[in-house]
Amino acid sequence: MNNQLKVQAGKLKNEVKKNYLCIFRNIHMQVSANTDEQKQLEKYALMTRASVKRLVVKMAIPTIISMLVTAIYNVVDAAFIGHLSTEATAGVGVSFAYMIFVQAIGFFLGHGSGNYISRALGAQNTTNAAKMASTGFFTALIIGTISAIAGLCFLSPLSRMMGSTSDILLYSNQYLFYILLATPFMMTSMVMNNQLRLQGSANYAMVGLAMGAVVNVFLDPLFIFVLHWGVKGASFATLLSQLFSCILLFLGTRKAGNVHIKFQNFKPALYFYKEIVRGGLPSLCRQSLICISTICLNRAAAVYAVAGQEASTIAAFAIVSRIMMFAFSVILGFGQGFQPVCGFNYGAKLYARVKESYVFCMTVATVILLIMGSAGYIFAPQLIAVFRSEDAVLLDIGTRVLRWQCLAFPLIGLTTATNMLFQTIGRVFPATVLSLCRQGLFFIPILLIVPSIAGLQGLEATQAIADVLTFLFTLPFAIKIYKELAKSNQ
């Protein structure tokens, strides 16, 4: 009898413990839900009521840092590798086309899902925002894994396709190997970075990328020069730093007030993929064309190079591309600071704030580009020498290419702001058309025509000519959307 009472008492005790645990868990979940809801309401109030100019600057500072950090991954590798040899510099430069492909997919899924999340939060639809966040993340993880496996299986053909010649193929393969392994982390990091940024949590996005860049800067010289791994060391350092960034960004998505990524929210529904295409297609087109144009430029550099100087010519164009991407990342970061402000207020139907943020973004971007373009033109030889001062041919060609591009650099402010505006508010057709111009509709035809007439000098001026034509093409779109926003506010 006593044993039966003890057994029943034990069961009752366990039942009470379970009930307490259940009550505690429910209270914890309710508190967490209330905290998230409160944070999201505070964020909504901030994005729709605070001063537009201050808000854009506040959002832009961490995104500029994030974009600069992304560019640092490439610039640091090129700067350290430049002291190994011209062939190594050219090999890494050729491999850059694959990294642009990774960015194309990452930005497509990140901008597509992030723009939707921004509008959904502006309309206070948190359920669909959570589903979209998980859809974008896990889709990137799947595509990144498939891309890595396919690239590793066809490593040398991939290098040759991107413009690698026989004397730089070894270096291109060595650099690509670990970059391919890093592909899933790179793609998912870009998705999380853009999702965090576009929901107004740019600080978390910045920290995730910045810490990865710090790791990369310290590991590069260790693996390249101390352990004597050369090009492979730079690539391996990038792999580790990208993995570190990916982990930090994922932890950032778990913070209160941010849309959490959960596998149970992964809903690969046609509706969500249509929205990703709607918000991300311009980015996919733009980055894909940059990838294609980079490959075409690599091949053209080998064709129009002085005999025996193919590696120097390819390396010169590759170095200028890194420098210009680093400079352009400032404007891209400022524009991305404008996007969440634009998306929230467009979703909330506050069109006057959208117009104000657009004009402010365009004006500031143009001023910054004017300053950077002037500095780049004046100090072009010194900038090229940072990467590879030992090669006189490379230094001469790189200086001329950089100066040509700096002349047209200030025109990019209007084209970038206008493209981002159309993309953020979901205007797929104009956003896609404008994204095709700079590296596609104008650059590739000019690349095929002008160098055939003017040789290497024509090749050096190709990007500048494309930028001028892109500005002239974008101007009517900018005027039209400005008038439309002004009218909607009346």
Image (tube, helix red, strand yellow):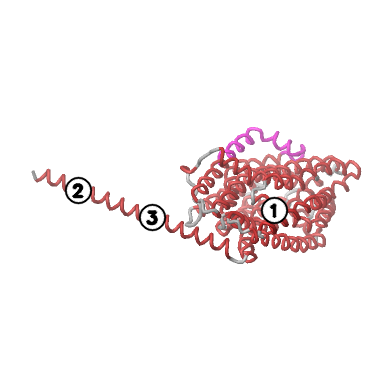
Residue, disc 3: 30
Secondary structure found at label 2: helix
Secondary structure found at label 1: helix
Q: Nearer the viewer, residue 4 or 309?
A: 4
Instruction: Locate residue 52: give its quadrant.
Output: bottom right
Residue 94 is left or right of residue 17, and the answer is right
Q: Which one is closest to the eye, mark 2 or mark 3?
A: 3
Q: Nearer the viewer, residue 175 or 411?
A: 411
- Marks 3 & 1, CB-CB < 8 Å contact: no
Label of residue 340 in the image: none
How much space separates mark 1 and mark 2, taking CA atoms? 66 Å
Please tell me how crowded label 2 is: few (under 14), some (14-19), or many (20+) other residues with Cα within 10 Å. Answer: few
Instruction: Check if residue 403 falls in the magenta segment.
Output: no
Instruction: Locate residue 442: give its quadrant.
Output: top right
Q: Is residue 33 above or below residue 99?
A: below
Instruction: Looking at this view, name the residue that lies furthest to the right.
Output: 453
- Name which residue type carries label 3: Gln
Label of residue 12 in the image: 2
Q: Nearer the viewer, residue 410 or 236?
A: 410
Which corner quadrant holds the C terminus?
A: bottom right
Q: Is residue 286 above or below residue 357?
A: above
- Name which residue type carries label 1: Val
Residue range corresponding to the magenta coloring = 141-169
Label 2 vs 3, first from the N-terminus:
2
Q: Is residue 311 above or below residue 332?
A: above
Q: Which one is closest to the eye, mark 3 or mark 1?
A: 3
- In x, y percent, where is residue 313? 82, 46
Residue 69 is left or right of residue 362, and the answer is left
- In x, y percent, where is residue 73? 65, 52
Main SS, magenta region, reads helix
Label of residue 75 in the image: 1
Instruction: Check if residue 145 falls in the magenta segment.
Output: yes
